[in-house]
Amino acid sequence: MFYTDGKLQYPVRVERPNPIFARALQQAIGGVEGEIRVMMQYLFQGWGSRGPVKYRDMLINTGTEEIGHIEMLATAVALNLEGAPLSMQEDVANDGIAGAVMGGMNLRHILSTGLAATPENCNGVPFNASHVYASGNIVGDMYANVAAEATGRVLATRLYGMTDDPGMKDMLSFLIARDTMHQQQWLAVIEELGGSTANLPVPNSFPQSQEASQFSYAYFGHRIDGQVPAGRWTEGASIDGKGQFAPMKSEPLGGEPVLAPPRPDSGAQTDQINASPVAANDPLTGGTPSVA
């Protein structure tokens, strides 16, 4: 169950309402870097967590915190929309400032909500959960969470630089601080479980003896001139200490693909259906049939 006392997690105040900034804040609500994403990610990771109960409890607790962040941002959007023009009346059309505001607003803030936030990004695209990661592997999920908090913190710092409103800067400074903590907390889980060395590769439960080990620590170079961007990833011991990094020029290791002809009921052309399986250089294109 979830409970609320009706109060905001942190004060939200707007001294100079700005409908265009309200639109920018939507990215922090429903963008791929936003709070809906991490809220759902942490909650679904927690609800599906198997193993030590403390990780489930931590994830659900943090997901619940993110609900409060969405409430704060939705309140900030609504406060920034106060005083926004509500129509395209002639006086607005003739007012350059009002016209600029209308042109920069998310019109759904007027048309769909009556000056309130929406569950979408700054371009009006609804959040669809396509960037919610909950794999059931605790370390894999922790790495995904670190990345989510890192990109979320980048977004929050950019929003901080976009506004000169003291109230908005104060709210964003709180959210930035929480992003700092959440990055640390997910990394702390990885450390508690043995650190990155012990946990790599993810999942570490799959026997590496069953990998094609000659490729496990090879950095593939795909440049036609054979050059490989050299760095820590091309020489020396691998991060997990189980191999040696080495550059490898990428070359085709398999032949050209050969597919069976279309089924008679597939809707393909008769010549396609009656043709023998061939490679890319088949007679239909003037080439030579491959040996099937």
Image (cartoon, rainbow, N blue to C red):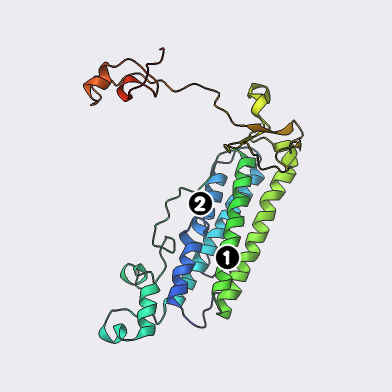
User: Residue 238, relative to residue 99: is it above or below?
Assistant: above
Write down the quadrant of residue 82 in the picture: bottom left
Write down the quadrant of residue 135 in the picture: top right
Residue 3 visible within the image: no
Q: Which residue is located at x 69 percent, y 46 percent?
A: 189
**Horizontal side of residue 242 vs 288, given as left or right:** right
Pointers 2 and 1 in contact (C-beta within 8 Å):
no
Residue 122 visible within the image: yes
For the residue pair 161 and 190, the one nearer the viewer reads as 161
Q: Element under label 1?
A: helix
Q: Quadrant of the C terminus?
A: top left
- The numbered mark at residue 128 is none
- According to the picture, the residue beneath numbered tag 1 turns out to be 156
**Horizontal side of residue 19 vs 211, given as left or right:** left
Mark 1 Cα-neighbour bin, 10 Å: few <14, some 14–19, many ≥20? many
Query: What x and y, as percent, mark residue 269?
Result: 23, 24
For the residue pair 36 and 243, the one nearer the viewer reads as 243
Q: Which residue is located at x 40 percent, y 15 percent?
A: 290
Q: What residue type is labelled 2?
A: Met
**Horizontal side of residue 25 vs 280, given as left or right:** right
Query: What x and y, as percent, mark residue 279?
Result: 40, 21
Q: What residue type is labelled 1?
A: Ala
User: Residue 267, relative to residue 70: is it above or below?
Assistant: above
Write down the quadrant of residue 181 in the picture: bottom right
Q: Which residue is located at x 39 percent, y 78 percent?
A: 101
Disc number lying in front (2 or 1) = 1
User: Residue 44, relative to residue 265: is it above or below?
Assistant: below
- According to the picture, the residue beneath numbered tag 2 turns out to be 40
For the residue pair 23 and 2, the one nearer the viewer reads as 23
Q: Element under label 2?
A: helix
